[in-house]
Amino acid sequence: MDVAGVPVPARRPSSGFAVVVEQELRDLWIGGRGLALMLGFSVLISAIAYLTATNTALNFLEQRESVNLTLQVAVAVGALLALLAAADAVSGERERGTLESLLLTPVRRTEWLAGKLAAALSLWLVAFVVTVPYVWFLARGVGLVGNALATGFVVGTLIALFLASVGLVLSVLATSNRVSLSVALLLLLALFAPTQLPSSAQRGWAGDLLLRANPVTAGEHYVGKIVVSGHAWSEDVSWLVSPMVAGIAAAILVPLMCARFVRLGRGVGE
Amino acid sequence: MTAAIEAAGVAKQYGSLVAVEDLTLSVAQGEVLGVLGPNGAGKTTAIRVLTTILEPTRGSFAVAGVSHRLPAEIRQRIGVLPESAGYPSRQTGEEYLVYHARLFGQSRASARATARALLEDVGLADRGHSLIASYSRGMRQRLGIARALVNDPAVVFLDEPTLGLDPAGQRQVLAHVRRIAGERGATVLLSTHLLTEVEENCSRVIILNRGRVIADGTVAEVVRRAAAPRSGMLHVHPEHVERATAALRAARGVAEVSRANGQPGALQVVLGAVPGVAVDTSLNAAVRALLDADVGLVSFELEGARLSDAFLAMTEGS
């Protein structure tokens, strides 16, 4: 016997995405975690800006170098925060026992994941806003403020999109929140590792390929070219290909493709 | 009339582990169905399949008239209180309900009105603005019931709603279960370990064992079918005790007769342990034997744990 039932048209919320984003932002920023993270970020960026400003005053550091350093730290830490928030998005709900009631709502899982991703990205956006006055202070007088902020925003947003999407994948697939967060941190370290390689290792076709293929190193390199070397945006645009492809593709594909893998857990219930 | 829940041969396997083997049932609209079963019987998995959280390995079902092939549409029409549900501790009760009502497509204003009405219904109106972190377990369960009702569901699934609650909390939660069926006219599927909950609240019961429905019917029907032994307390005139004991021992279907300690004229009897003899027949035979022996019968009380006897008889060894 096959129980067919009666075909009934779906009645979903008109924008499940908007409802999820609103609640996630409320939980992140009014619940306190977002503000606490931003306080920590502000302290860090203040210390970096102070150190670079004093080194510049003592002529140990070029003014452009100090802007670049501050911007790169802001991008790296802002994207890290987005990654960690996304890595907690699904596995955290699973661990807190709140996932099942969310899966029981008629909101599409794609919309739900996209809402989680957008909320995680808000950490990067606020981190960037916090960084603006520091960059303005360090870059004033050399006509660099606009260019530095625009480059930092574009590259930072692409890297944050990429890392947050990766974090979301980990969160969907991980067996526990701890696994998800640990793997996310390890991945971030692996992506940033090439920036610490000696200059000799970064030269040659292999080093060049490694830096260009990695969206994080390629993005940071591009920021350096614009801010330190004073290149035009179009001059080194090839360095922007990897962060752009990775960021946009991941942000579109991850919610679409991961939706089917959102599960309560393996063998849950028995 | 369309059944509220209809399942045919539903099975769920995790690799080689069979959690639900053959779930076939039909639940009428407005019915309160109790689902009983020992640990690992497949109750939670069955509920997760019927609520579209898990996909069945085989078989088909419809909930509120909607085929299992349309899971989002089923979710629109059901309310679920999952087993050991968690709650976001940093949200208030009202925020939590508003969020879920909006996920079901309500406008902000409508969601707020729904949340307030439900908080009132479950007796949490004065705590609606408190953080859920400050709620007791009983309050959280009532909040979970309110959440299950935000979309005014046609079918409500409650998985162990009284687990871990004190007797007062259990009573409150069960009162809400009765109201869901009585006032809202919703069909309720109540999974529980507590047999008295089923006896007091359910119009029908199924017993699951090893992923299969092994009994289905009203409580009385299930008990009768189980042919489970039942015990009773009999009071006769103290001078008739010997005669009553002899008459009962000779009656068909009476398994055991013993004197109740410290109570003159009180006898403990166990009925229905004879294969092929129903408990009701044993009871009639026992009373007839006493009357035939001219015993002065003061009272005859069957003890209450009827469903528990049937449950144990049916699930023994699992």
Image: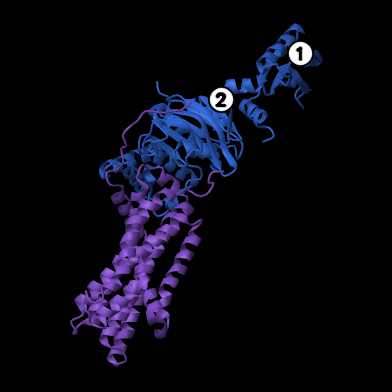
From the viewer's perspective, is the residue at label 2 or at label 1 nearer?
Answer: 2
Left or right of residue A175: residue A236: left
Rendered residue at 50%/35% (across/down): B58
The residue where tag 2 is placed is B216
Q: Amino acid at mark 1?
A: Ala
Rendered residue at 35%/64% (across/down): A162
Q: Amino acid at mark 2?
A: Asp
The chain whose colour is blue is B
- Check whether the beta carbons of the residues at disc 2 and disc 1 lie within 8 A of each other: no
The answer to which image quadrant residue B259 occupies is top right
Residue situated in front as seen by the camera: B31 or A248: A248
Q: How did the renderer colour the structure? A: by chain
Residue situated in front as seen by the camera: B105 or A218: A218
Query: Mark 2: few, some, or many residues within 10 Å (few <14, many ≥20)?
Result: some
Residue situated in front as seen by the camera: A145 or A3: A3
The answer to which image quadrant residue A167 occupies is bottom left
The residue where tag 1 is placed is B251
Residue B221's mark?
Answer: none
Going from N to C along the chain, the mark reached first, 2 or 1, is 2
- Which tint was used for chain A? purple
Do circles 2 and 1 both sit on a common chain?
Answer: yes
Residue situated in front as seen by the camera: B20 or B92: B20
